[in-house]
Amino acid sequence: MTEDEARSWVREHFGVSRETAVERFGALLTAEAEHQNLIARSTLDTLWSRHLTDSAQLVPLADSAGTGVWLDVGSGAGLPGIVVALLTDRPVVLVEPRAKRVAFLRDAAEHVGATDRVTVIGSKVESYRPAQPVAVVSARAVAELSALMLSTVHCTDSSTVWLLPKGRSAQSEVDAARAKWQGQFHVEPSITQPDSGIVVATQIGAR
């Protein structure tokens, strides 16, 4: 997917005003790259396809989720969490343990006008206790699937939809996770990187 195609996908699915909001966030990411390694410098020229639209494609995959919080684990650069907040009306909780990135996420949420629905938690997800089970869990390049579920399952219930970009290892991680976790697993091909997969999981519980 080219940069123009990636931008067009967001515009077609979410409208011009939301595309503009995502563009504003992309400019923040690019500027912050001068100060900390939020994203690889080598990917700045492909910001839409590698990061912004790559995050945005998770939103339609959450259509079956109930109302409630979208929990983004290890948010780092705000991918996909900030993008999700700009493209939906859901409350989004970003959990990130690194102080410098927590500061960036809070500043970014304010800059893009999303503080009314974005909460940034400066801790590891193991320490986070939501008031009620979250509707959606996302995590991008955080941990192997089984380990990620172990650290996060206390925030969920059987109705939670898990959306986990896993690159080329998606199917092999699902196969390994099935030994420890029961539930419905599906690997959705990425629209931005055809050789990559997104793990979509529901009804998750330990075996």
Image (spheres, helix red, strand yellow):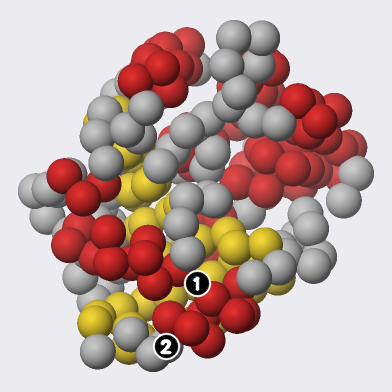
- Horizontal and vertical percent position of residue 21: 59, 24
From the image, which quarter does the C terminus lie in?
bottom left
Percent position (x, y) of residue 180? 33, 85
Badge 2: residue crowd in 10 Å (few <14, some 14–19, many ≥20): some
What residue is drawn where x is 79% and y is 58%? 193
Q: Amino acid at mark 2?
A: Arg
Q: Which residue is mark 2?
A: 178
- Is residue 194 among what the camera can see? yes
Above or below, 158 against 40 in this view is below
Tell me which amino acid carries mark 1.
Val
Where, by quadrant of the figure, is residue 170 drawn?
bottom right
Q: Quadrant of residue 157?
A: bottom left
Picture coordinates of residue 64, whole percent (x, y) = 42, 70
Nearest to N terminus: mark 1 or mark 2: 2
Secondary structure under the numbered disc 1 in the rendered image: strand
Q: Quick one: 47 or 123, which is closer to the camera?
A: 123
Q: Secondary structure at mark 2?
A: loop
Question: From what the image shows, is residue 199 above or below residue 155?
Answer: below
Can you identify the residue that label 1 sits on?
200
Q: Residue reaching furthest left?
A: 131
Q: Which mark is residue 137?
A: none
Q: Is residue 66 visible?
A: no
Q: Nearer the viewer, residue 114 or 37?
A: 37
State if disc 2 and disc 1 touch (CB < 8 Å).
no
How many residues crowd around disc 1 within 10 Å: few (fewer than 14), some, or many (20 or more)?
many
- Say which of marks 1 and 2 sits in front: 2
